[in-house]
Image: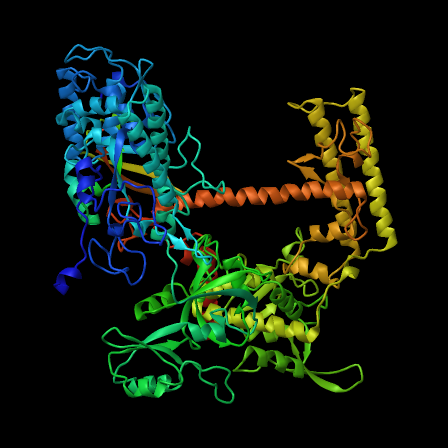
Amino acid sequence: MNPTLTNQPKKIGYMEFGLLSPKEVRGLSATKIITADTYDDDGFPIEMGLMDPRLGVIEPGLRCKTCGQKVGDCPGHFGHIDLAMPVIHVGCARTVRDILRSSCRGCGKVLFSERIREEYDRILASYLNEGKDASVLAKKVAKDASNVTVCPHCGREHGAIDVDKPTTFRENGHKMTPSEVREWLEKVPDEDLPLLGLNPAVCRPEWMVLTVLPVPPVTMRPSITLESGERSEDDLTHKLVDVIRINQRLQENRDAGAPQLIVEDLWELLQYHITTYFDNQTAGIPPARHRSGRPLKTISQRLKGKEGRFRSNLSGKRVNFSARTVISPDPNLSINEVGCPIQCARELTVPVRVTPANFAHCQELILRGNDPEAPAGKLYIPGVNYVRRADGRRVKVTDKNCEEVAKRLDVGSTVERQLNDGDVVLFNRQPTLHRMSMMAHTVRVMPGKTFRFNLPCCPPYNADFDGDEMNMHILQGEEARSEAEILMKVQENIRSPRFGGPIIGAIHDHISGNFLLTWNFFNADAKGAKLPIEDATQVLARVGFRGQAPPVFSEKDERGEVRKYVWGKDLFSTLLPDDLNLQFRAAACPPGMSEEEARKPENDYWVVIEDGQLVAGGIDEKSIASFKGVILDAISRKHGNARAREFLDKVTKIGNGFLTLRGFSTSIDDEDIPDSAREEIDEKAAETRRRVDALVASYADGTLQALPGRTMEETLEMEIMRETGQARDGAGEVVASQVGMTNSAVLMARCGARGSMLNLSQMAGMVGQQAVRGERIKRGYKNRTLPHFRWGDLGANAKGFVASSYKVGLTPTEYFFHSMGGREGLVDTAVRTSRSGYMQRRLINALEDLKVAADGSVRNTAGTLIQFQYGEDGIDPTRSAGGEGIDYDFVFTEVERRSKKGKKGGA
Amino acid sequence: MTDEDLRFNVLNHEIVPLHEILPEDEVAPLLETYDIVKEQLPKIKSSDPAVKVVGAKPGQVVRITRASPTAGRFTAYRLVVEAI
């Protein structure tokens, strides 16, 4: 074939769907099928049976009796069954109904007078002209014509057509046999068909009533031999056996002149089998079942739905060059990297084209074989699995033949080299909900059996390490590799298109580590933590720091010896770019504290960075975490993604490094509060119960003042909820007053590493009111929630008020109420995920072919304009400042700073 | 469409953006800026209440100027098509 022709992209002009005429079915057929049996006693297929050798080959080695080809090459050939009586095709039942309703039984013409007919013809012509879908018009025609009672052409009365689902038609209540339906449809003239949405060239309505059934080739319904030697047939074959059996009986009975009743029964049975052969989930008829009771998977089930041919095999495919395993964390990797087990790396390959320039290198690779031993000091070196020669032959490389293969290597071959450090791969976790769920990493081959990556990559993948698995895909071409590196690398995805800020940032320990390193801890004379120089060197070594060392100062230690120290803030400053200037309130700052107060060195809640030096403030969630990290945001915007990645890699290492030296843990003691505080909380709970009782009493005697627009009951519930809410808040305040920043749990909550003060107050103070659907617990037994309470008890305890803390432990009734509240949360999550999943599917199907064109407009693949300017402002949200095109604050402070600096320099 | 036929002029409603017929001589330059043919413009039915008010006929282009949360003010164009 002419290669220039086959390589040309071709455009599909149009597609047309039509029906097979009985003549075509017979023409296509390799043989008529008359016996329901498949194989004879010797295991050979029976001629003119369902497994006739002329229908194609499924056994390797044999040749097809029709085309003479072997298994892979023979596409299979159709056969046919001649039906004794015609049968309606379920897939066409609706169309048949519409045609019967809109055409005359006598003359077959559409029930329109000439005048109306001309009007419709005109509309149809304009539809076809504009390339619109004519089936929309067909629906309207069917609707209008079915209202006509007398045929305007022959004057015959037109009866009402009813359908008994799925395939029985009635005219004025009288059943029509498929033969009668077919006769009627035969009368509809060709020139009326376009009005009904049919093209007479490919589809005559009478073909919707089957007289001959095509039998699909055996390649489409292969039988399998079980280990026991038993043959197991495909569901379609089973169904066809049924069809043939009934067809034979029907023929015999009819030919023998059996009573009408028996023939009709058999006819209906044939209709049932053919209907279920096409669609075994047809409404109104019981699905045909296998002997085991399992419903058969017939033609429409093969195609439809998530597991059907389209969604499962055509839109989605299984791929090579991919790996899947459990994930685990590795804080020593860069966020751009992924750790890959040696076992995976040995299987996965990258194609390397052999050129004169890399010939020697390729030969050396091949000489290693497919399982090379790593030299001393290395754990892994890549070998070669296959060599693909220029003529398309693939040679498997082994230890035995590697020398031979290397010797015979020539330029133009492709060497399939095993995965090596630095290869670019795609890494993905399902569900792939946004583009950050699939990012490009560079490989680090390492021992162990899990994929490993650094913790800042957890939020974009929504991954944790409780057994999650992830997939890796190895890129196979230069173009794909560079595209992935430019667009999909982790560092390119630090900023999220969702809100124009960082979605990858420091988490958990990184935040508490940096906070402990940089925060003054109420010491006005400090500049963060005081590190002995040995420790500071350790931390810097971990970061891999090179450059100007941070300032060192000397001080006497407790034994009176002079030692050298480094301040934590100075240590952190080594990570910052020199021209960074920022000021903001830290996340740890208690709400309501004034700026003046927060700036005091003993509080140290106001972060000040001048020329890349951390002057004041503790580094916490607000500075370096995902979603909030101001420093991260500033660096990625001003210095680019590579610098942001470097900062993030170092910030996580400095956090971990300091935390390792200092030591940090939280335990159950962190939830301990003094007895006096416990008593105070218990007193608050008792007070709340008394107040609730008082409210209930005032409700009972009718003195409760109903709120505007509320009933008495609603008012009571609202007041009680308010009371119990106050009780929990009160307990939280008591807990907060008892614990300080020396408490690890508090420290983590305040600096945003993990947990909240609410979590802590529930653990140490009081769990609080439990609710289902936003109301106090009210369901359970008759007029009461649990048998522990009196009927109609409206008090606090009886309706889910949990006065205990998790530390103290819940009473049995409290525990039960808490479980009820917890269950609601679980159910909500389950319902929400399934719903939003379907919503996302619909949305993506609607938007999948849109893209931003070079001129900034949004277009679909047909070239139609969707939006004249992307987002109407043409701004890429990923590169925006929280969605805005320009960060004015940033510009103003920058201009101000530079003008000041300029004056200083001049003076 | 004349004023008598209008029981209610939707364009006077505050959330309905300004619709106006794009003069014939501005259509070609518009299509040229986006390098498209008329049919590639977004469509609007001739039965659309706003289209009825401005009296645009199928084949004409309507300019819609609306408030935009991102750009402040945004101009879109739509090709009027025959209603089914």
Q: Residue at x 41, y 80 (%)?
A: A370
Instruction: Say how many tags the image has.
Output: 0
Q: Position of residue A662 (x, y in %)?
A: 70, 74
- Regarding residue A579, the answer to whether it shows in the image is no
Query: Closest to the observer: A663 or A384?
Result: A384
Q: Residue A236: name its quadrant.
A: top left
Residue placed at 19% from the left, 13% from the top? A151
- Quadrant that contains the N terminus of chain A: bottom left
Q: Along the line of sight, which residue is nearer the eye, A698 or A449? A: A449
Height in image: A191 above or below A418?
A: above
Instruction: Place residue A355 in its image quadrant.
Output: bottom left
Q: Nearer the viewer, residue A81 or A723?
A: A81
| Residue A631 position within the rendered picture, expressed as x and y whole percent measured from the top left | 53, 64
Q: Is residue A664 above or below residue A729?
A: below
Residue at point 76%, 23% (across, down): A704
Tell me if A73 is positioned left or right of A279 in this view.
left
Q: How is the image coloured?
A: rainbow
From the viewer's side, name the closer residue of A900 and A796.
A796
